[in-house]
Image (cartoon, rainbow, N blue to C red):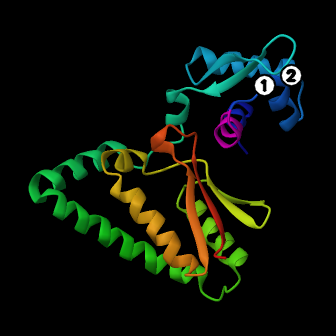
Amino acid sequence: MHSTPEQILLLLKKNGPQTAEMLGNSLSMTSMGARRHLHALGKVGHVAPFDRAEGVGRPRQFWQLTPEGHARFGDAHAELTAKMIGDVRRLFGEEGLAELIAERERDMRLTYEKALAGTAALQARVEALAAVRAAEGYMARVERDGADFILIEDHCPICVAATACQGFCRSELALFRIMLGEGARVEREEYLLDGGRRCTYRIGKVE
């Protein structure tokens, strides 16, 4: 079981800024209790408060993760990854880096094809894709929005690699389109590297 502070960090990671009352409701505790944990997390630099105006009345105090708070979720082998990408680019140029990305995409395609085997309906394929992405550390889940599905990834375990080379992100989007088939429309809506809180993808049937 996660400790209460860890659960608070996880809720802020998944749901974005929250008030103490909202967090208290999610954790079956009082807003005062949640606020005590938030102040403790604030002292170590993992969360920070800000005021948000919502219509008439006084602004409400929300809490959000700081960069240090986001870093608690990790970027697998971040320093080594960044160095290796820099080395590949220096030694083999952009062409060598493109080959590295293509090789990663081939490996991922084998894994995803196995995970999606036996699924035909778009919903089943999207849910299977989310499950394998969650297993890879992306904190992936699916929500419904009318006729569309929203694939939400609350965390990016390769963020340092993606920041150093956005070819990784383009490769993943292309792979999603291949895995979900020609009858599926896949568009990225939120993008972490463009200042988004997370990456989200709108998926629907091609009309």
- Quarter of the image holding residue 102? bottom left
Report helix, strand or loop for mark 1.
Answer: loop
Residue 141 in view in this figure: yes
Number of callouts:
2
Q: Which residues are magenta?
A: 9-16
* Residue closest to the eye, 87 or 126: 126
- Badge 1 crowding class, 10 Å Cα cut-off, few under 14, some 14 to 19, many 20 or more, is many
- Quarter of the image holding residue 8? top right
Image quadrant holding the N terminus, namely top right
- Residue drawn at the location 80% of the way across and 31% of the way down: 23
Is 18 situated above or below 141? above
Q: Earlier in the sequence, mark 2 or mark 1?
A: 1
Report helix, strand or loop for mark 2.
Answer: helix
- Quarter of the image holding residue 193? top left
Residue 96 horizontal/vertical position (percent): 17, 63
Residue 168 horizontal/vertical position (percent): 37, 58
Q: Residue furthest left?
A: 91
* Residue closest to the eye, 118 or 178: 178
User: Which residue is identified by label 1?
Assistant: 19
- Residue drawn at the location 50% of the way across and 37% of the way down: 195
Left or right placement of residue 94 versus residue 148 in this view? left
Query: In the rendered structure, are the residues bearing label 2 and label 1 in contact, judged by CB atoms less than 8 Å apart?
Result: yes
* Residue closest to the eye, 191 or 25: 191
User: Which residue is identified by label 2?
Assistant: 31
Residue 77 in view in this figure: no
Residue 160 horizontal/vertical position (percent): 37, 44
User: Residue type at mark 1?
Assistant: Thr
What predominant SS class does the magenta segment belong to? helix
Q: Is residue 66 magenta?
A: no
Q: CA distance from mark 2 to mark 1?
A: 8 Å
